[in-house]
Amino acid sequence: MNERQENVYQQYPTYENFLAAQGPNQILINFSNIHEIEESISVPRLSIAEMNEIYLRNDFNPGIDYYVKWLNFFNKFSNINKAMPMDIVNWAAIQLYLRYCHFYFADLKVIFEKILEAKYGKFFGSVDTVLIMSAFLQYNEERERLLHKEKERKAIEYESWRKVRSEQLRTEVYNELSSKHPDWLTGQIYEHMNQVVVQRIALEAKERFK
């Protein structure tokens, strides 16, 4: 398990504990300040797949079960006369998990709201399975586009920071080495300076660009 999963497991030792605090009804409250995809993906969060790894058992897939509960909650919350039948719910949950297990729980809150707001189309008398599946597809496409855009932005930010910080470190490290090794030739100083700068840049970047 990664650090994020370890923290969740410490807080919620069982899937039942997790559901009590992070079930479909609770995420509307837990992520009440998140309304857009950009906000959901702004920081790394626990994904459905990561949660599934924590609580997976031989005869039970919590990721699929969570999607079943999400769909049932949507059926109830939307207050549409004809809800999605249970056999269709089970089928849809499997498909949603297989295709969108990378979603964060915050994503499920955001898409829940967007479907209710008819962002991806309107329901007419029944919860439309095609509309649900189409909504997830469109949401994911937009999510991937925004993630790619954010990745490019961070790459530009990193490169800009790296250039400035490298120049600062070269001066600092050169002075350190010159003072510590007055007998070294200039070539020796520059050789070691470059190695130290690369190492420090890597360490600082790891902390700065988590």
Image (cartoon, rainbow, N blue to C red):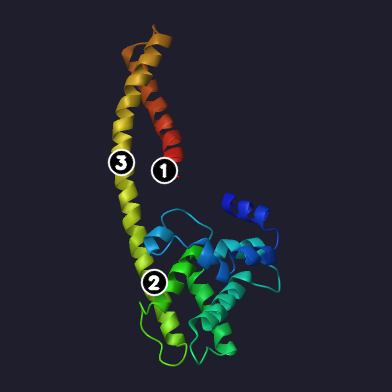
Q: CA distance from mark 2 to mark 1?
A: 26 Å
Q: Residues within 10 Å of mark 1 (few under 14, many from 20)?
A: few
**Residue identifier under label 1:** 209
The secondary structure type at the circle numbered 2 is helix
Looking at the image, which residue is at 57% across and 61% down? 50
- Which kind of residue does numbered mark 2 sit on? Tyr
**Which image quarter: residue 198?**
top left
Identity of the amino acid at label 1? Phe
User: In the image, which disc is placed on residue 139?
Assistant: 2
Q: Is residue 123 depicted above or below 73 in this figure?
A: below
Compared across the picture, whether 138 is left or right of 128 comes to left
Q: Quadrant of the N terminus?
A: bottom right
- Residue 91 placement (x, y as % from top left): 55, 84
Residue at x 61%, y 75% (from the top left corner): 65
**3D distance between C-alphas at marks 2 and 3:** 30 Å
- Answer with mark 2 or mark 1, whichever residue precedes in sequence: 2
Pointer 3: what residue? 159
What amino acid type should be assigned to the residue bearing mark 3? Glu
Question: Can I make out residue 117 in this image?
Answer: yes
Taking 114 as reference, is 2 above or below it? above
